[in-house]
Amino acid sequence: MPPLRPWSPVPIAEAGEPLEDLPATLWRLEPHPYQALGAPYGAGASPFRLRRGVIARLKKAQGLLQQQQPHWRLAIFDAWRPLAVQAFMVRHAFREVCRERCLDPEAIGPAQAAVAAEVDRFWAPPSPDPATPPPHSTGAAVDLTLAEADGRPLAMGGEIDAIGAISHPDHYAGSSPGSEAADWHARRRLLAAVMGTAGFAQHPNEWWHFSHGDQLWAWRCQEPLALYGAVAGEG
C-alpha cells in the first residue's frame, strides 16, 4: 500500500457544496486527455466540474492574472476526477513510464517498484476510504496552465502530468536572466501567485496542481479542517 500523504490525517468537515460545470469564462483544454484515453467517467459525467466555492476562486484568479497580463487567461486541463478515473490513470501512468524505460509493467521487480514509487509522488492512490480521498475526487482540485487570449497554452517548461523533477514548481529557479528557462520560471511563479492570492494551495511536486478546501489545502495553509471530501458526480 502506498504511504499516506502528509495531509491525509487532516479531518474533513464536509461543506456540502455541489459540483458545478465550469463557466464559459474559464477556458477548457479539449479534447479532455483522460476521456480521450477511455477513462471511465460514466455516461453524462464531465471532468470540467468543481465545487461552487472553488469556481468562484478560479474566477478571482483569472481576474488577478489579467490585471498583470491582460491578454493571458487560465486554461483548465482537468478538474473533478472520480475514483474509477483515478485508478485508471494511476495504472496508465505506471505503464507509460515502464514503456519509456523498456520495462515489463506486468513483471515484479526492483525496477518496477521504483517506477511505482515515482508515479506515487504525482498520482494519489485511488483510496475509497472517505477519510483519505484523492484531491481531485473532492471537486476541490484543479490542474491548469496559462494560455494566450485565443486559448493556446504558453510554454511552462514541462508538460502537465510529467513524471520527474521537471514538474517541481521551482525546477527552473536560478536560470540565467533572459533565458527561455527564466521565462518558464516566471510564468510558473505568476500562476502560483495569482492562484495563491485567490485562496488556493499548490501541490508541492506539481506546478499545475492547485486546490482549495481539500486536505492538501488544509495541510499547506495550516487549517484544522478540510471543507470537502470525495463527491460522486451526477450524470
Image (tube, rainbow, N blue to C red):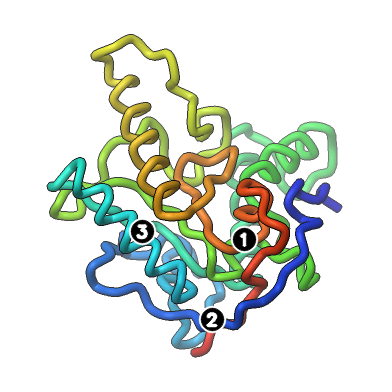
> Residue at position x 63%, y 46% from top?
220
Residue 51 % position (x, y): 49, 74
In the rendering, which numbered label is found on residue 202? none
Q: Is residue 4 left or right of residue 135?
A: right
Q: Amino acid at mark 3?
A: Ile
Q: Nearer the viewer, residue 88 or 83?
A: 83
Please name which of the two marks, 3 or 2, marks the residue nearer to the observer.
2
The outermost residue toward the top is 176
Report the residue marked by disc 3. Answer: 76
Tag 1 residue? 135
Q: Relative to residue 74, is residue 80 drawn left or right? A: right
Q: Marks 3/2: CA distance?
A: 20 Å
* Label annotation for residue 17: 2
**Is 52 or 152 nearer to us in this picture?**
52
Q: Is residue 5 left or right of residue 28?
A: right
**Amino acid type at mark 1:** Pro
Callout 2 secondary element: loop
State the image quarter where residue 91 is shown.
bottom right
Whichever of callouts 3 and 1 sits on the residue coming sooner in the sequence is 3
Report the Cα–Cα distance between label 1 and label 2: 16 Å
Q: Residue 151: where, in percent of width, then height?
A: 20, 54
Q: Amino acid at mark 2?
A: Glu
Q: CA distance from mark 3 to mark 1?
A: 16 Å
Q: Mark 2, residues whose alpha carbon is within 10 Å: few (<14), some, or many (≥20)? A: some
